[in-house]
Amino acid sequence: MLHELADLCGAQSGALWVSGERAGLRLRAWHGLVDRKAMPERVDATLVQNKPWHAGATFLVPLIAQSEVVGLVQLSDPLTGRFPPELVTQASLLGEFAGSAVRQAIKVSTLQRQGLRDRETGAYTLSYFTDYAAKEIYKARRYARTFSVLTFSIDNLPQLRLRLGNEAARAAQRATLRALSQIIRDSDVVARATDQEFHALLPETDFFGALMFLRRALQAMHDEPEARALEQKVPFAMTGGASTFPRDGDDFDELLVRCKKRMDERRQSLHRQLKLEGQPFWDEVELLLGNSKSPRLPETTGEPSRRGRVADVLFDELQTEVARNLLREPNARGLIYVGVPELNVDVPIAMGLEGVDPTMAPRVYLLGRRGDLVTHPVITPVFVEGDDRLHRHEFLLWLGDGSAYALLQRRGRGVTWGFHSSDPTLVEGLVSALQTEYSLQPY
């Protein structure tokens, strides 16, 4: 369309905006001497005149179909130096033909989407998702690539429907889809599996990437206005689980089974048992550490968590071991946070990673008062001044590709009291709370 109109009018440059799923006309094509950065991404269709018109070296041609503006062409840099008045009639006729073609294409595209998408939520249907996953598995097997599948469940949807009605349940489903749609890429696919569950497929995404997506999705859900409005009436219980091809399975069913297993682990996590979601970091630390007179931690069927007296050397030995693991697997992505009273060059993890390749994939943060450690090849120092809580406590948080660990400890007179856990959900929660507490980059 753009080239035909440019040829008709003798224009060397041009741009085309076309109606899409969202409001307004979206920039779809341009050529010639057009400055792409100076062109608006969207144009308000209500501001477009329904007849072609030109001003100086610019010629605007609307694409009209049944009195509706479905596109706009902007032409410039005429070969003759100006656009002659007689072009208005010719451009108007070609614009009407182009408008009819655009409208028909939009109608066909809409029918195709309706056949592939769930009517209530707008997510893709499970049949389309399964077919897409089969193609992704074929591609991943042939080219030795990876991808991840995630499942999200609105656990309390039946209770929400019972207390607030069907419309509230549909609002919860729409809010879930909107939250996911805010963070997915163009290549990602989201589908509605059941009344309560949604699936997401992320091409070219490893397990650590899937975990980061899961954290972002749950945060987006927490920030979604409609979900927050429902939360004020009935607690909104969202659970997610992730799996990755081929480490968790080599077919779609295996990946879904692994997702559901990890969702169950999240439901049984100590983090949920103690209702730590949304608590400040140091409140979580004090609750988990407790003291010798605190009641026993709730029993869970997931990963173990323990508290009690720990050896004074445990914290230093763990830092040294983490450094060894990072050197053995420098390409395994992960997040490590170590909190100490003072940042010095003799902190074990700093000594263990001295001279390491700066391109190492894991990201390591060391928090504490400013000492003689100012810079490091792979460690990011986070100077925290005047926080007595960090002076009294030490911690190590490790969130990696398929592994998680947390050690919290408080040194006393002759006794070091600690808490440690390999519960992935609990570690994720501690990491998120720590990032919020000290304004650290979340992902």
Image (cartoon, grey):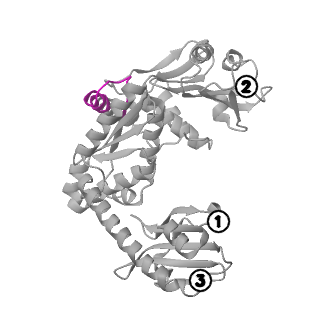
In the foreground, 393 or 183? 183
Of the numbered discs 1 and 2, the one sitting upstream in the chain is 1
Magenta stretch: includes residue 383: no
With respect to residue 372, does 163 lie above or below?
A: below
Neighbours of disc 3 within 10 Å: few (<14), some (14-19), many (20+):
some
Residue 281 is situated, as x and y percent measured from the top left of the image, at: 54, 38
Taking the view exactly as shown, the residue that stands out farthest to the left is 162
Q: Is 303 placed left or right of 111 in the picture?
A: right
- Secondary structure, mark 2, is loop
* Mark drawn on residue 377: 2
| Comparing labels 3 and 2, the label whose residue is closer to the camera | 3
Spatial CA distance of label 3 from label 2 is 60 Å
Residue 443 is situated, as x and y percent measured from the top left of the image, at: 54, 39
- Secondary structure, mark 1, is helix
Q: Callout 1, which amino acid? A: Ala
Of the numbered discs 3 and 2, the one sitting upstream in the chain is 3
For label 1, the residue is: 38
Spatial CA distance of label 1 from label 2 is 40 Å
Q: Residue at x 48, y 18 (%)?
A: 308
Q: Which residues are magenta?
A: 242-260
Q: Is 362 placed left or right of 400 in the picture?
A: right
Q: Residue at x 66, y 82 (%)?
A: 56
